[in-house]
């Protein structure tokens, strides 16, 4: 060795040479490789040519930039030929042929085998120009004159496609109803026409309606065809008028006869029940302290005392009626108090012992007048002296207890204009008098105690039946709220009077405000709960999601692959887009040229010269967007937005014509039948009433709606048309019966808020005062004016933290509090599921969650909306990488487990528990869902009992982001006991029919049958075992007859395995059908028990046996095996028992399941086994002309039988020994690959 160094460290490190000892070297080694340079020819100098383009270092030639090779004599190619070719020594690139990468800039090199068959490599490879160093593509046939050759291949002209732009375009891309074959549409079944624009006549005949009136009305006794669902509902309505008030919930405070009393300023007190909690008017109090309370009979303890005979002068010799002016609340009338025996005295009885806090008086005096309190023991308590004449004077007492009378006395005569006293702090209030006793269950109050800190102690709500005795409804309310405050009164209180009272701090002199007091009867703020409405839509069909162009990525959805819309297909069946009218045209009176949009492929932004779109946004191609949404699996709805900010009212020459032309153009291009097929429905606007951006003139919107609806229906009658979302005071002014002829559903938005002391606050969906109940007014309006018309809830949801984003302000507004509409991530997940369940119970036809993802929160957006809706997403915003929130997983679990079910009824719906039934939508209940209607962060549980004669099969939790299995609830055959929480508890049942029992097996058996055993399963779930006559399965002995009927409530997704024990010898006939997990019938056979004293049909977890009541049971005798094919999974065949396990793996793991069935050929005669036989995987496996296996393979088949106790298949033997499979039963058609 001549040199030693280390490899592995980041820099060159020389080390000591190894130590030579005799004939060996001793080397110290470590984790870093140690290198030894040796002499004797292995360590030589460099080639002389190295010095031309490099230098020699330690025997290696190190090249200068631009050269490479052992001698640095090769010229380096530019950018290594862009990884698309090989570099020759002279620096020239030899470019290869590649697969196209669809514009992504990455290519796969064509291999020799790729050139032998049709495909890109043989027919249209991407090649590159060697003169450009394989940088610029040399496009085949120069893109056939229909495109531009770029570094990424051909960029084809509008409509053309293919690697060389060789594929001609088809008209309207076959409208998504067919496949384009070199310019010609090959329409799929059901469509015809050059662009597959026409429904096939057979489809029209099938439902009896033409393409111009495609909707079949079911509401009338004679089915008829119409252009819209709204037209159907018009014909079924019993009224020709437009009932605008039918759905309104009238508060108690708005009913005739309601009056208002107040502690002061009575002239404005009526403003608190005028229905306007804003600028419509308010009540402003006087200044209670120090003298404002004098005229208030509730605060002033002695107001009117003299009228009631409680006043006296001197020893009481002056008639009390002559003293009225002293306590009449009028400070301008007076009473004289004369001097009698050297003392002038005026006294007032308080009626009972009081705790006084102040005494006030206006007197005319000489010297002073002393105020004295008398206790029940006749003790005197001196309060103080009045020394001023003609002035109102207040003496603060603090809190003097036990006073039964008040005395004013002096050694000189004096006059009393007014005397007053009060108990406790000063207060101001407004009292609503309903005119009679009513029940109050909900209040909404807006009050304010000004901005003087420390001036008011608290605010409280009180009720009374007689106006004398008061009960507190709610106390310790912050007096300084600016917004409304909701209060649920549970249980409802009976009262005639309702009071809102501000209690001031002593000696505080401020004026107080109340804008509005609204009270509702025992049915609450949103009226009586609507009766449950069994849903015509499954939960999956109901659920959708609101998206936007590009789903937050600033890229067309067609380029997003597995991202974008595909993130949400696990929880949503449809998606709704916000499509702005001004993106398409700059003037609403012009017609958008949708057919001239550019097919831009995966290119997102930046107009390509000569290829601009003709829309207002020249880069925009809606076909790229909506086609990708539909291909993701969504049914697409579009909200065509227009606001005063986009198009001020003045820019419309003709609102009706503008709407008609735009609706016609949109439906003609995108419509489901006459368009591309990408969009199923449109909404004419989003929220036209929105303050600041909407249109205040309802007639203007009404004209646009009628025009756009008519235009869309004229272009494509199958385009579903909805009006915009409306508030409950908005519909009658903007929509009328004429519009109804052209719309297919009503549309509304609702979120779950409650007015709390924090402001508008996110609340759980079941709360009686949740604003989510606002959907009820639309349902009532629909029932009154358009029976049967679907109602879509196109926006609902909750804001929450999660996904790395909170509910707080941006850094620039760090001093602001979190916005109160935002709930926890856990609560959002629970509410999303519970909200879907509750809304499905109301009978809504669509539930479209807002929004797909969180939005960025900046100082500008925070100032505008304080974060509202910015955290309503199912994923986080782009800045945190669209991270999944718990609600997305919770909705996916809901859809994947019970998304196929329909709401069917309510078992319980109260303050403690909600229990709903879901099932197949006909008469069969398959699931029970139960939960506590509480805050989503409430971790408490409770046990409830449900009267239900059903057998639980499986249980799990909803409202969490992952599937969580739960133990089965307890049952005694008639009741289920369930532990419920804020997350819904789901119980899958043996299906319970809400109709009659269904007979599924009828068989003649000996009367000696004393026990039967049942094994039942839903085909999609695991087996459960139970015995006896529990649950909904029962055996009936019909008198002395030998006939036994087994009946149970079921649907067609269930099956039953039955075992009969203790049978007498003899033949017992039953006809059975063996079915696979895929619901495919495998075979039908008669099974006989022979002469064995016991018979049992055994089933694996992969096989079910069902019985039909329609089958006949003829006498039949057969001995030996009965074969049928069997669907089995290899997990069931891993526990085979073979001595040669290597042979077993080679044979079984690589083999094919051939056949299987029920057989008597076992070691225990009379025991029927489920079995399978497999053949070894022989390459030359062939079938005869009859489709049967070769005979020489059958004898060598390996057979397994199912060991029920171990729940596995065990090796049974070879077919040569068992003779289970013969040439007539081993069909190649039954072979199932591994």
Image (spheres, rainbow, N blue to C red):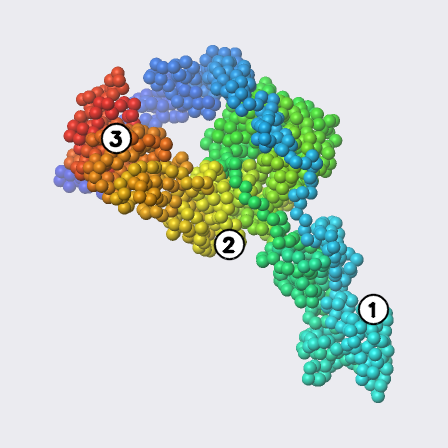
Q: CA distance from mark 2 to mark 3?
A: 58 Å
Q: Earlier in the sequence, mark 2 or mark 3?
A: 2
Q: Quadrant of residue 171?
A: top right
Q: Quadrant of the N terminus?
A: top left
Residue ID for mark 1: 330
Q: Earlier in the sequence, mark 1 or mark 2?
A: 1
Up-down relation of residue 183 to residue 1136 (above or below): above
Residue appearing at x 60%, y 31% in the figure: 220
SS at circle 2? loop
Residue appearing at x 58%, y 24% in the figure: 214
Q: CA distance from mark 1 to mark 2?
A: 55 Å
Q: Earlier in the sequence, mark 3 or mark 1?
A: 1
Give the label on residue 912, or none. Answer: 2
State which mark lies toward you, 2 or 3: 3
Q: Is residue 553 visible in this depiction of the protein?
A: no
Q: Position of residue 1135 (x, y in %)?
A: 23, 38
Give the label on residue 1116, or none. Answer: 3
Total marks shown come to: 3
Residue appearing at x 45%, y 20% in the figure: 135
Up-down relation of residue 1113 to residue 184 (above or below): below
State which mark lies toward you, 3 or 1: 3
Q: Position of residue 551 (x, y in %)?
A: 53, 34
Tell whether 374 sits left or right of 823.
Answer: right
SS at circle 1? loop
């Amino acid at each position: 060795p001549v040199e030693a160094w280390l490899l592995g460290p980041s820099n060159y490190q020389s080390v000591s040479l190894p130590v030579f000892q005799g004939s060996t070297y001793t080397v110290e080694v470590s984790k870093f490789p140690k290198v030894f340079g040796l002499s004797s020819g292995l360590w030589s100098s460099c080639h002389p040519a190295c010095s031309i383009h490099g230098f020699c270092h330690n025997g290696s030639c190190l090249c200068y930039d631009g050269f490479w090779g052992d001698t640095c004599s090769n010229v380096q190619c530019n950018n290594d030929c862009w990884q698309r070719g090989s570099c020759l020594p002279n620096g020239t690139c030899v470019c290869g042929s590649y697969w196209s990468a669809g514009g992504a800039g990455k290519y796969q090199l064509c291999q020799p085998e790729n050139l032998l068959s049709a495909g890109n490599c043989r027919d249209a490879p991407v090649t590159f120009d060697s003169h450009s160093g394989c940088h610029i593509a040399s496009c085949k046939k120069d893109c056939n004159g229909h495109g531009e050759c770029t570094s990424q291949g051909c960029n084809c002209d509008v409509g053309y496609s293919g690697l060389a732009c060789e594929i001609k375009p088809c008209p309207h891309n076959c409208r998504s109803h067919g496949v384009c074959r070199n310019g010609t549409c090959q329409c799929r079944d059901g469509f015809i026409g050059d662009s597959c624009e026409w429904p096939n006549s057979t489809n029209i005949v099938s439902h009896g309606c033409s393409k111009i009136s495609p909707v079949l009305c079911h509401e009338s006794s004679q089915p008829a065809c119409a252009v819209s669902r709204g037209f159907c509902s018009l014909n079924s309505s019993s009224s020709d008028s437009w009932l605008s008030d039918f759905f309104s919930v009238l508060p108690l405070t708005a009913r005739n006869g309601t009056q208002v009393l107040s502690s002061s300023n009575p002239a404005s007190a009526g403003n608190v029940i005028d229905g306007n909690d804003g600028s419509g008017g308010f009540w402003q109090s006087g200044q209670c302290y120090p003298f404002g309370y004098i005229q208030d009979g509730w605060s002033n303890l002695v107001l009117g005392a003299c009228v009631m005979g409680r006043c006296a002068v001197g020893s009481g010799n002056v008639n009390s009626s002559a003293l009225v002016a002293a306590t009449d609340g009028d400070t301008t009338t007076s009473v004289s108090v004369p001097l009698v025996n050297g003392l002038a005295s005026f006294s007032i009885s308080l009626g009972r012992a009081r705790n006084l806090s102040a005494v006030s008086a206006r007197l005319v005096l000489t010297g002073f007048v002393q105020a004295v309190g008398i206790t029940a023991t006749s003790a005197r308590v001196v309060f103080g002296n009045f020394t001023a004449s003609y002035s109102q004077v207040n003496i603060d007492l603090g809190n003097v207890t036990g006073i039964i009378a008040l005395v004013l006395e002096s050694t000189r005569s004096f006059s009393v204009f007014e005397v007053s006293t009060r108990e406790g702090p000063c207060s101001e209030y407004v009292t609503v008098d309903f005119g009679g006793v009513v029940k109050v269950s909900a209040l909404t109050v807006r009050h304010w105690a000004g901005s003087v800190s420390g001036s008011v102690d608290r605010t409280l709500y009180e009720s009374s039946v007689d106006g004398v005795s008061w009960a507190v409804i709610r106390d310790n309310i912050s007096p300084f709220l600016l917004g409304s405050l909701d209060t649920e009164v549970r249980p409802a209180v009976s009262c005639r009077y309702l009071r809102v009272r501000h209690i001031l701090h002593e000696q505080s002199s401020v004026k107080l405000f109340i804008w509005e007091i609204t009270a509702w009867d025992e049915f609450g703020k949103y009226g009586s709960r609507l009766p449950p409405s069994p849903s015509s839509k499954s939960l999956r069909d109901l659920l959708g999601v609101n998206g936007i162009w590009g789903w937050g990525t600033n890229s067309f959805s067609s380029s997003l692959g597995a991202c974008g819309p595909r993130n949400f297909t696990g929880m949503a069946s449809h998606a709704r887009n916000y499509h702005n009218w001004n993106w398409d045209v700059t003037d609403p009176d012009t017609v958008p040229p949708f057919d001239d949009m550019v097919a831009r492929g995966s290119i997102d932004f930046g107009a390509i010269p000569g290829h601009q779109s003709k829309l207002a946004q020249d880069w925009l191609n809606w076909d790229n967007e909506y086609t990708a949404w539909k291909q993701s699996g969504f049914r697409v709805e579009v909200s065509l937005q227009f606001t005063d900010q986009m198009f001020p009212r003045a820019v419309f020459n003709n609102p009706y014509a503008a709407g008609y032309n735009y609706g016609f153009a949109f439906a003609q291009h995108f419509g489901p039948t006459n368009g591309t097929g990408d969009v199923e429905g449109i909404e004419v606007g989003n929220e036209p009433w929105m303050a600041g951006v909407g249109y205040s003139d309802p007639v203007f919107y009404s004209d646009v709606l009628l025009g756009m609806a008519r235009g869309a229906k004229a272009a494509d009658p199958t385009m579903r048309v909805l009006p915009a979302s409306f508030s409950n005071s908005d519909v009658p002014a903007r929509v009328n019966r004429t519009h109804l002829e052209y719309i297919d559903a009503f549309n509304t938005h609702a979120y779950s808020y409650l007015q709390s002391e924090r402001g508008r606050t996110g609340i759980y969906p079941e709360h009686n005062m949740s604003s989510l109940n606002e959907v009820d007014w639309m349902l009532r309006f629909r029932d009154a004016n358009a029976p049967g018309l679907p109602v879509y809830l196109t926006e609902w949801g909750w804001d929450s933290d999660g996904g790395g984003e909170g509910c707080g302000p941006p850094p620039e507004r760090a001093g602001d509090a979190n916005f109160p509409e935002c709930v926890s991530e856990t609560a959002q997940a629970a509410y999303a599921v519970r909200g879907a369940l509750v809304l499905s119970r109301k009978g809504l036809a669509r539930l479209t969650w807002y929004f797909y993802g969180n939005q960025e929160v900046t100082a500008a957006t925070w100032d505008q909306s304080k974060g509202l809706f910015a955290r309503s997403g199912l994923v986080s915003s782009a800045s945190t990488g669209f991270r999944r929130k718990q609600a997305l997983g919770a909705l996916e679990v809901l859809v994947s487990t019970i998304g196929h079910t329909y709401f069917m009824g309510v078992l319980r719906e109260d303050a403690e528990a909600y229990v709903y039934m879901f099932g197949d939508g006909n008469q069969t209940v398959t699931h029970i869902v139960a939960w506590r209607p509480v805050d989503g962060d409430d971790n408490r549980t409770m046990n409830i009992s449900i009267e239900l004669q059903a057998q639980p099969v499986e249980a799990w939790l909803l409202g969490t982001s992952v599937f969580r299995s739960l133990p089965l609830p307890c049952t005694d055959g008639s009741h289920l006991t369930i532990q419920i929480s804020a997350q819904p508890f789901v119980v899958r049942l043996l299906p319970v029919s809400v109709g009659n029992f269904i007979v599924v097996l009828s068989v003649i058996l000996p009367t000696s049958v004393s026990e039967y055993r049942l094994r039942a399963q839903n085909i999609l779930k695991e087996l459960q075992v139970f015995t006896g006559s529990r649950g909904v399965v029962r055996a009936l002995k019909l008198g002395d007859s030998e006939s036994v009927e087994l009946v149970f409530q079921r649907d067609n997704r269930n099956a039953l395995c039955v075992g009969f024990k203790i049978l007498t010898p003899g033949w017992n006939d039953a006809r059975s059908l063996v079915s696979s997990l895929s619901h495919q019938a495998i075979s039908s056979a008669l099974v006989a028990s022979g002469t064995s004293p016991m018979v049992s049909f055994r089933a694996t977890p992969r096989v079910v046996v069902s019985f039909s009541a329609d089958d006949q049971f003829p006498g039949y005798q057969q001995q030996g095996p009965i074969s049928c094919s069997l669907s089995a999974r290899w997990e069931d065949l891993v526990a085979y028992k073979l001595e040669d396990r290597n042979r077993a793996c080679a044979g079984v793991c690589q083999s094919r399941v051939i056949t299987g069935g029920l057989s008597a050929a076992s070691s225990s005669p009379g025991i029927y086994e489920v079995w399978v036989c497999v053949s070894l995987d022989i390459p030359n496996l062939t079938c005869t002309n009859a489709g049967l296996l070769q005979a020489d393979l059958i004898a060598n088949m390996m057979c397994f039988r199912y060991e029920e106790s171990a729940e596995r298949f065990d090796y049974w033997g070879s077919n040569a020994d068992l003779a289970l499979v013969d040439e007539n039963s081993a069909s190649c058609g039954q072979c199932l690959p591994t």
